[in-house]
Amino acid sequence: MSETSGKQWAIAIHGGAGSMKRATMDDAGVATHEAALHAALEAGAAVLREGGSAMDAVTASVVALEDDPLFNAGRGAVFTYHGTNELDAAVMDGASRAAGAVAGVTHTRNPVKLARTVMEAGPHVFLAGAGAEEFAREHGVEQVDPDWFATEERWRQLQELKARKLGWFDDGLKYGTVGAVACDAAGHVAAATSTGGLTGKRWNRIGDSPVIGAGTYADDRAGAVSCTGSGEQFMRVGVAHEICARMRLGGESAQGAADAVLAEVGAMRGVGGVIVVTPAGETVFAHTTPGMFRGRADSTGLCEVGIFGE
Ligand code: ASP
């Protein structure tokens, strides 16, 4: 799935890879998710249409997805084994390769905004847990009661996981990590990813999403990548950086690099998906799960969302 031409701007988003199939999702569910994806896509596209930066665009799209309880990020995040919500997020700017990330935050309404504040306020790249939240309060990033994140559906999924004694990476129960990649009119790219991680996770487990180079990466010399899937394998492969490295050093196409790196993840028995944008405004999707919530738009008028495989 690749789309390219001489573009002024382009954006792609994802709302998580998983076991979604046309046969198992009703029309109302499809319509609700498609509307949510369109709204998040438009939040970022509007920024780019008005000449805004790729970083502002990916932040706007991910904030919209975090605030939507349909997706596993911000409000609607999955529950840990102990019934809490622990959120991870990262952003990266392809022009400067500046990056910011947070893990295990429990009170920050929009973890992507906190990741961006970490990037902009410096000097660090990655903050976790209580320290990240102290930093959030010091920098005036909006804090909420942990109840803000909790939804009945995610609670039900945790109880189901416990009742069925499933492992904590179960395709059927994991949905909705979110991400965005964009290219602006100046040819700069940016990436953002945000997640509640895996249902039933324990021991302050952190996945690939906030790990720069694993779930999130941006480099104007190649492109911007945001990932979703089995985080442990995505970290071991360094998926987002590996895709950029293949494009930059090996001259591979975005689609070729994305497919090849997901095959490496598959060889480790990992599954998931990626979205990629290049500085020329090409947008690419790739996933090895049956479905991935996704969408893309650009200055040529392209505007589409999808859920299932082709
Ligand atoms: N990659 C995320 C994690 O491992 C989960 C997901 O994308 O659904 O935390």
Image (tube, rainbow, N blue to C red):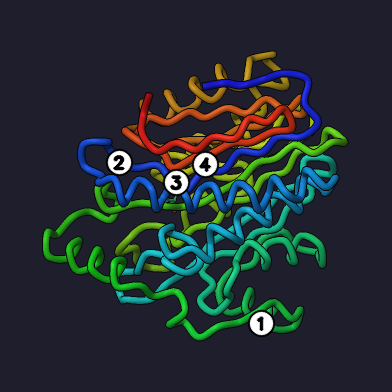
Q: In the image shown, does 230 or 280 lie closer to the viewer?
A: 280
Name the residue nearer the viewer: 186 or 131: 186
How many numbered marks does the figure carry?
Answer: 4
Q: Horizontal placement of 156 versus 79: left or right? A: left
Say what amino acid the circle numbered 4 marks: Cys
Label 4 to label 1, Cα distance in Å?
A: 28 Å
Q: Residue at x 80, y 39 (%)?
A: 184
Q: CA distance from mark 1 to mark 2?
A: 38 Å
73 lies above or below 41: below
Q: Amino acid at mark 3?
A: Glu
For label 1, the crowd category at 10 Å Cα-Cα, with few meaning under 14, some 14 to 19 and many 20 or more, is few
Disc 4 beta carbon < 8 A from ligand 1?
yes
Q: Residue furthest bottom?
A: 145
Kind of residue at disc 2: Met
Q: Residue 105: x and y, percent?
A: 54, 72
User: Disc 2 vs disc 4: which is toward the camera?
Assistant: 2
Nearer the viewer's eye, disc 1 or disc 2? 2
What residue is pinned by disc 3?
A: 34
Query: Which type of secondary structure does the marked residue at label 3 adopt?
Result: helix
The disc label shown at residue 227, or none: 4
